[in-house]
Amino acid sequence: MATASSLAHTHHLPYVFPLQRRRLIARRLLSICSNHDTQSGGEILMHSIPRRTLFTSLFIYSSYLHTSSYSSAHALGDPSVTIEQVTPPVFPSGTLFPPEQRIVQLFEKNTYSVVNIFDVTLRPQLNVTGVVEIPEGNGSGVVWDEQGHIVTNYHVIANSLSRNPSSGQVVARVNILAADGVLKTFEGKLIGADRAKDLAVLKVDASEDLLRPIKVGGSSSLKVGQQCLAIGNPFGFDHTLTVGVISGLNRDIFSQTGVTIGGGIQTDAAINPGNSGGPLLDSKGNLIGINTAIYTQTGTSAGVGFAIPSSTVTRIVPQLIQYGKAVRAGLDVDFAPDLVANQLNVRNGALVLQVPENSLAAKAGLLPTTRGFAGNIVLGDIITAVDNKPVRSKAELYKVLDDYSVGNKITLKIQRGSENLEVPIVLEEKSS
C-alpha cells in the first residue's frame, strides 16, 4: 500500500516531471487519501512529506485530473454539430483534359496485350506475416501474334531455362486479361530464347478472342524528351501503368543475364521488379521497346530504366520463333583477340587471323595473317569500318555486325599493308 513515506524520495526531482512520473505520484497521493480519513491523511501529508515536494505533488495531481477530464471530453466529440454539417460536398471529376484522356485510351487499348508471367520452377513462399512474397520469376510479357506467341525477357524465366528445357516444354504460367476483367491462366511453352539479347518467346494455347497482339512501332527515329508509357506487373500488381519520357538513347544495358546489350532506350517511367518483359510504348501506343532493367541501389525504381529497342526485338523474335534460337550474322573469319592485336601494333581495327577455304570471306578475297620465309609475322587484313561505321577492335566489329542479318551484303573497309581497300561481302551465319 502506498504511504506518505513512499513519496518522500521525490523531493530531489526537478519541477517539470515526465508524464509517466507525474501520473505515478498522482496515483500515490490518490492511494494515501483513499486509505486514511481526512484528518489522519492530512497529518501524514503535512508531517511526512517535505513542503516543496507536497505542493509540487498536489500540482501534478491537479494537472493529472484536468488532463483526464479533457481527454474524456475530447473523446465525446462535439454534440452541437451534425454529420451533414461537417461533411464537405463532393464534386464530380468531370471531363478529363485531352492529354489525360489520350493516356487513358492508350492504356485501355493496350492493356489486353500485356500478360503476367511466372516461372513455374519458382514458387511464392509465406513469410512470418503470412503475406505471399513475389517470386524472383515474376514478370511481364506482350502478345506477339494471334498464334499465341508471347515475348518476354530471358531473365524472367532464367531459372527454368537453367535446366535446359526442350522446345515445347512448359516453363511458365501466363495470365491473360480477358475482356470481362478476369485473368485467365495458361501454360507457357518454350519456343526459343536468346541470352545475349535477354529475349525469350513462349506460346500459349489461348483462343483468338483473348490474344490481342501488340502494335509494333519503330525505334530508330525516337527523340529524347518524347513521352512514353510502360505497362507491366511490378511486385505482382498486374496491369500497372507508369508514364514518363525518353531520357536517353543508344545506352548500353547491363542485363541480368550478365551480358551487355547495345542501343538501349533509357526512360524515367517507373520500372520496378515485375515490369521486366513488358512493353514500352510511344504516345501513339506503339511498342518501341521491351522493358528489361533498372539502374538502382535499392532494388526499386530510381527514375533510370532501360528497354531493349523494338529494332532489336523485331530482328530477334522472328528468328526465335522459326529456329528456336537467334541466328547471328558474321564473317566466318577468325580474328585476333584485341590484346594480341595490340601486341602486333594493331591499334585500330580487327585483325584477320584465319580465313577458311571456300568461305564467303575467302571468295571475297580477305587475307589471313601468315608467317614469312624468315619466320616473321605478316599481318593479314585489318577491318577498319563496316558500311562506313568505324571499327576500332574485334569487340566493336561484333557489335556493329549485330545490327545485320544473315544474307545482308556489306562493304568492308580494310587496311592491307600500306593500302586502303573496300571489299563487298555477304554475311554468313556466325559459328558458335
Image (cartoon, rainbow, N blue to C red):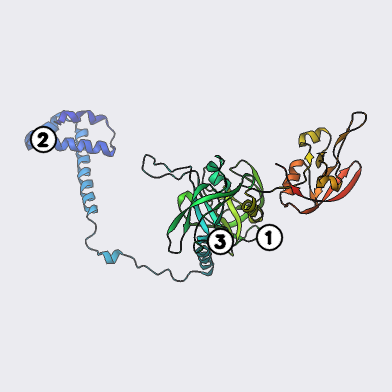
Neighbour tally class for label 2: few under 14, some 14-19, many 20 plus, Cα within 10 Å: some
* Local SS, label 3: loop
Question: Which residue is identified by label 1?
Answer: 221
| Mark 2 or mark 1, earlier in chain | 2
Q: Position of residue 131 (x, y in %)?
A: 38, 45
Task: Give how far apart the Cα atoms at labels 2 and 3 are.
Answer: 94 Å
Residue under the image location 60 percent in, 44 percent down: 255
According to the image, label 3 marks what residue?
A: 146
Give residue 352's position: percent from left, percent from top.
Answer: 82, 40
Measured from the top left, where is residue 65 in percent x and y?
Answer: 19, 45
The residue carrying mark 2 is 42
Q: Amino acid at mark 1?
A: Ser
Q: Is residue 260 visible?
A: yes
- Say which quadrant the C terminus sits in: top right
Of label 1 and label 3, which has the lower sequence position?
3
Q: Secondary structure at mark 1?
A: loop
Q: Quadrant of residue 380?
A: top right
